[in-house]
Amino acid sequence: MKRFVTALASLTLGIAGVLSQNNMEEIKPIAQDEALVELKTTMGDIVVELYNDTPLHRDNFLKLVGEGFYDGVLFHRVIDSFMVQTGDPGSKNAPAGKRLGSGGPDYTIAAEIEYPKHYHKKGALAAARTGDAMNPERRSSGSQFYIVTGRTASERQLEASDMKRINGKMEKTFQQLAMQHMDSIQAMRKAGDDNGLEALRQQLIRETEAIVKPEPMPAHVKADYIEKGGTPHLDGEYTVFGEVVKGLEVVDKIQKVATDEADRPTEDVKIISAKVISSPK
């Protein structure tokens, strides 16, 4: 436990920024066992499977596909050995050099982070989002998503990544607990009661340790990252809601294209069309 709580020693009793965001529009749940979506791109076809235990993301994705939302969008952010990102409606017919990545529908989606069941292995399908400072609830973009390419990792790198994930979760929990005591914190600050502040900090550390139970990375997850690759440092931060089941070689080709200083491909890589090819009863 001790190695996972080092970061707590320097935590301050501050308030995390909270962004008021629009709720996701109502989407009718889809009864199904699984869903497969085909993305026809200018570099080949990709088939993704959507997970059932991330139903908000699954149903939203299927809804947008059914509306033709993704037809014509670009892969606007491509980073070799990391990921390829798409889903910005503003990228359709965007002129060369235009900065992209801020577009989407007028809603966000509640996080459905299911680590370690779903993790950022190579081929994982995950939702993009704004950063924690503006989005402490880690709500997902209403339309933008990325497919992981990543790289293989060593045991030591995975241990460091796991420690960072656990410490991040502890810090977030600590700040949430601190917000529940803000009246007392402000009163003690005003009175210059440093001893009271320190006592409360120690109390919140103990409460944080009781809530967050560090668990080692499962063996099968570690094996995937060591043998196949991925982006383990994103685990617990973004919602993974599916994976590529066909066409991973196409994703590999996309990640290798030339890009500009904003990571946009210098020659457009486009989703020509997206369609549901399997929507079980």
Image (cartoon, helix red, strand yellow):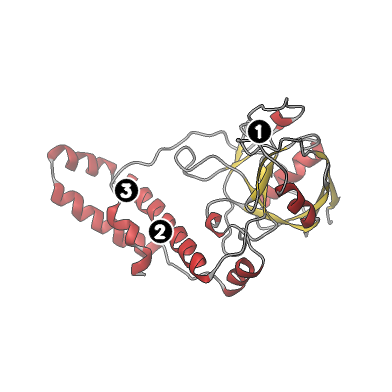
Q: Is residue 215 visible?
A: yes
Determine the residue positioned at 55% across, 43% down.
139
Residue 250 image position (x, y, % from top left): 79, 52
Q: Earlier in the sequence, mark 3 or mark 1?
A: 1
* 3D distance between C-alphas at marks 3 and 1: 33 Å
* Image quarter hosting the C terminus: bottom right
Image: 187 above or below 276 = above
Q: Which residue is mark 2?
A: 167
Determine the residue positioned at 60% across, 38% down.
108
In the foreground, 208 or 122: 122
Left or right of residue 99, residue 37 in this image: right
Within 10 Å of disc 2 (Cα), the crowding (few <14, some 14-19, many 20+) is many
Q: Which residue is mark 3?
A: 178
Left or right of residue 117, residue 17 in this image: left
Secondary structure beneath dot 3 equals helix
Q: Which mark is residue 38?
A: none
Secondary structure beneath dot 2 equals helix
Residue 105 image position (x, y, % from top left): 66, 32
Within 10 Å of disc 1 (Cα), the crowding (few <14, some 14-19, many 20+) is some
Image-quadrant location for residue 223 = bottom right
Q: Nearer the viewer, mark 3 or mark 1?
A: 1
Q: Three-letter amino acid code at disc 2? A: Asn
In the foreground, 281 or 3: 3
Q: Three-letter amino acid code at disc 3? A: Ala
Q: Is residue 56 visible?
A: no
In this view, the residue farthest toward the top is 95
Q: Which residue is mark 1?
A: 104
2 and 3 marks in contact (CB < 8 Å):
no
